Image: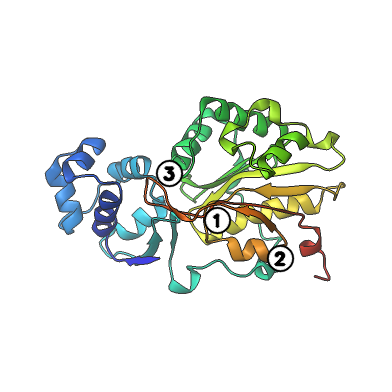
């Protein structure tokens, strides 16, 4: 992660990564180009009403903007590839999986089930940087919320701004086999590929997208998933996913997820580092008291 001491430096890097001129950026925010110039050279702070516009337009974490857009900025680390921030170098990396288990009962009231179209549309905008979301996938997300409300979640910060989400699809066995064998791309999933997991002898949960703007919020979402499967009467479930971010690979290995196949590592059209792989497993052994 890169350490930032001023909001102007973040905006400059955002424009460079997204190949935007100051005029382009100003137009998106409906401000004069001189306003953008003043923000970037640090001669003026961003007004509160424009902070919200910047967060909405750039998808930058609200906490990052608030920390740096102050008369006395709070130095903050941020990684555009991971889209995550932290307040210290020590907190840049995910802790090992044992730390997750040790603190498993710590929860937050900032998590809720997706229940608004605006939730889904905001998440779709966020995911556009690393996934292509079709109209049919929007319907898949809505159906997954209906079938599995406990795991299709959004987390916000203390001010109510988006901080992360989890999208978990309860799959039919046939859809799982096609994803596993690479006969089916996750973007091609339809509502017909979902099912009521309670009716299956071996429920299959597909982690379509689990992401957060900081390791703290990642912990809260992941812990909610762990508690849900830990407390399920049916422990024959299978969890699988095709993550593309590299930052959680070591943790996935520690909790028992096995890699079935790996895609090509590289950068996508938005400059984000990607490392697709199909991984699967069951958290029962990891979550057991004696492990």
| Residue toward you, 169 or 173 | 173
Q: What residue does disc 2 label?
A: 101
N-terminal label among 2 and 1: 2
Q: CA distance from mark 1 to mark 3?
A: 19 Å
**Compared to 230, does 116 lie above or below?**
above
| Residue toward you, 100 or 200 | 200
Q: Position of residue 8 (x, y in %)?
A: 24, 56
Q: Residue at position x 80%, y 47% from top? A: 237
Q: CA distance from mark 2 to mark 1?
A: 15 Å
Q: CA distance from mark 3 to mark 2?
A: 31 Å
Q: Which type of secondary structure does the marked residue at label 3 adopt?
A: loop
Question: Do the numbered discs 3 and 2 sit on residues whose CB atoms are within 8 Å?
Answer: no
Q: Position of residue 2 (x, y in %)?
A: 36, 66
Q: Residue at position x 57%, y 51% from top? A: 243
For the N terminus, give its image quadrant: bottom left
Q: Residue at position x 55%, y 52% from top? A: 263
Of tags 3 and 2, which is closer to the observer?
Answer: 3
Asked if residue 91 lies left or right of residue 1, the reply is right
N-terminal label among 3 and 2: 2
Q: What residue does disc 1 label?
A: 217
Answer whether residue 229 is visible to the viewer in this image: yes
Answer whether residue 170 is visible to the viewer in this image: no
Q: What residue does disc 3 label?
A: 129
């Amino acid at each position: 992660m890169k350490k930032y001491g001023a909001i102007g430096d973040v905006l400059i890097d955002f424009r460079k990564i997204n190949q935007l001129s100051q005029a382009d950026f100003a137009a998106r925010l409906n401000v004069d180009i001189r306003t953008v110039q003043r923000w970037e050279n640090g001669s003026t702070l961003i007004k509160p009403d424009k902070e919200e516009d910047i967060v909405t337009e750039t998808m930058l974490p609200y906490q990052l903007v608030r920390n740096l857009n102050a008369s006395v900025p709070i130095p903050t680390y941020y990684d555009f590839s991971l889209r995550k921030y932290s307040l210290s170098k020590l907190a840049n990396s995910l802790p090992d999986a044992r730390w997750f288990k040790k603190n498993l009962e710590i929860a937050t009231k900032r998590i809720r089930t997706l229940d608004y179209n605006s939730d889904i549309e905001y998440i779709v905008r966020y995911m556009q940087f690393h996934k292509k979301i079709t109209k049919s996938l929007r319907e898949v997300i809505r159906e997954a919320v209906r079938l599995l409300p406990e795991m299709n979640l959004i987390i916000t910060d203390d001010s109510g701004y988006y901080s992360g989400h989890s999208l978990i699809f309860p799959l039919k066995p046939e859809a799982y086999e096609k994803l596993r064998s690479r006969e089916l791309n996750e973007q091609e999933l339809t509502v017909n590929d979902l099912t009521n997991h309670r009716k299956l002898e071996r429920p299959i949960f597909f982690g379509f997208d689990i992401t957060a703007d900081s390791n703290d919020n990642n912990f809260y979402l992941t812990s909610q998933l762990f508690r849900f499967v830990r407390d399920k009467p049916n422990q024959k479930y299978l969890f699988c996913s095709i993550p593309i971010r590299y930052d959680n690979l070591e943790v996935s290995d520690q909790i028992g997820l096995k890699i079935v196949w790996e895609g090509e590592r590289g950068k996508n059209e938005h400059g984000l580092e990607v490392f697709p792989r199909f991984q699967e497993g069951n958290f029962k052994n990891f979550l057991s008291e004696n492990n």
